[in-house]
């Protein structure tokens, strides 16, 4: 896992939410849904250290990714200036919750919520639940340094993120198991 903030991070989002740089980086999605590292009601931006990890993280929501809206996704490359950063290692997370990779870890959500409210740093590097050897970078839009990120370059990398069709059987099995 990385120990320092990368110069560029990546995010998959709906095209409708990426109309402007301000929209793309607003973190408003955190107001409406819980995430691994926060409870709904907070501005937060989830990013990844690579395009591959960004796509892999989206597979958590594979049924949505393979839906009829699949071409509504874009990959954003976000250039990060030097901002205050905290690092949470996989060992630290596992010490707080050995089952942290399971959906709905109270430890992860509580840690993220405390981090957001404290504004201890603008960025928080956390292990990916999909690949604990890789990292996601959480960004706090309420932090005073965040405006530096908003002012930085944000480029659309891909406009059509249709997943590999070989993954479709996995999604169908998931839907059957979920009773959809």
Image (cartoon, helix red, strand yellow):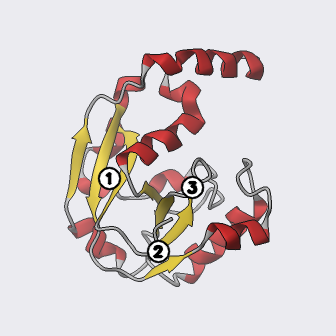
Which SS class for mark 1? Answer: helix
In the picture of the structure, the residue carrying the numbered disc 2 is 3
Residue closer to the observer: 89 or 158: 89
Residue 105 % position (x, y): 75, 57
Q: Which residue is mark 3?
A: 128
The numbered mark, 3 or 1, whose residue comes first in the sequence reads: 1
**In this image, 37 relative to 124: left or right?**
right
Please give the name of the residue rendered at 35% of the width and 52% of the height, measured from the top-left corner: 10
What's the mark number on residue 175? none
The residue drawn where x is 21% and y is 51% is: 155
Q: Earlier in the sequence, mark 2 or mark 3?
A: 2
- Residue 153 relative to residue 88: left or right: left
Residue occupied by mark 1: 23
Q: Is residue 112 above or below residue 26?
A: below
Rendered location of residue 39, percent (x, y) = 66, 59
Q: Give the Cα distance between marks 3 and 1.
A: 25 Å
Relative height, residue 145 to residue 108 (above, below) = below
**For the residues marked 2 and 3, what is the alpha-carbon distance in whole angstroms?**
13 Å
């Amino acid at each position: 896992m990385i120990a320092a903030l990368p110069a560029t991070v990546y995010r998959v989002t709906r095209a409708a939410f990426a109309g402007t740089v301000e929209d793309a980086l607003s973190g408003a999605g955190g107001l409406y849904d819980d995430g691994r590292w926060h409870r709904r009601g907070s501005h937060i931006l989830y990013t990844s250290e690579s395009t591959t990890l960004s796509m892999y993280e989206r597979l958590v929501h594979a049924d949505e990714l393979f839906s009829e809206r699949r071409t509504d996704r874009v990959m954003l490359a976000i250039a990060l200036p030097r901002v205050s950063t905290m690092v949470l290692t996989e060992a630290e997370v596992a010490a707080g919750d050995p089952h942290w990779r399971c959906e709905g870890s109270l430890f992860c959500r509580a840690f993220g919520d405390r981090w957001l409210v404290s504004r201890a740093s603008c960025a928080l590097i956390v292990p990916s639940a999909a690949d604990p050897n890789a990292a996601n970078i959480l960004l706090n839009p309420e932090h005073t340094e965040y405006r530096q990120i908003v002012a930085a370059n944000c480029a659309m990398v891909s406009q059509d993120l249709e997943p590999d069709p070989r993954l479709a059987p996995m999604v169908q099995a998931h839907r059957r198991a979920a009773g959809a």
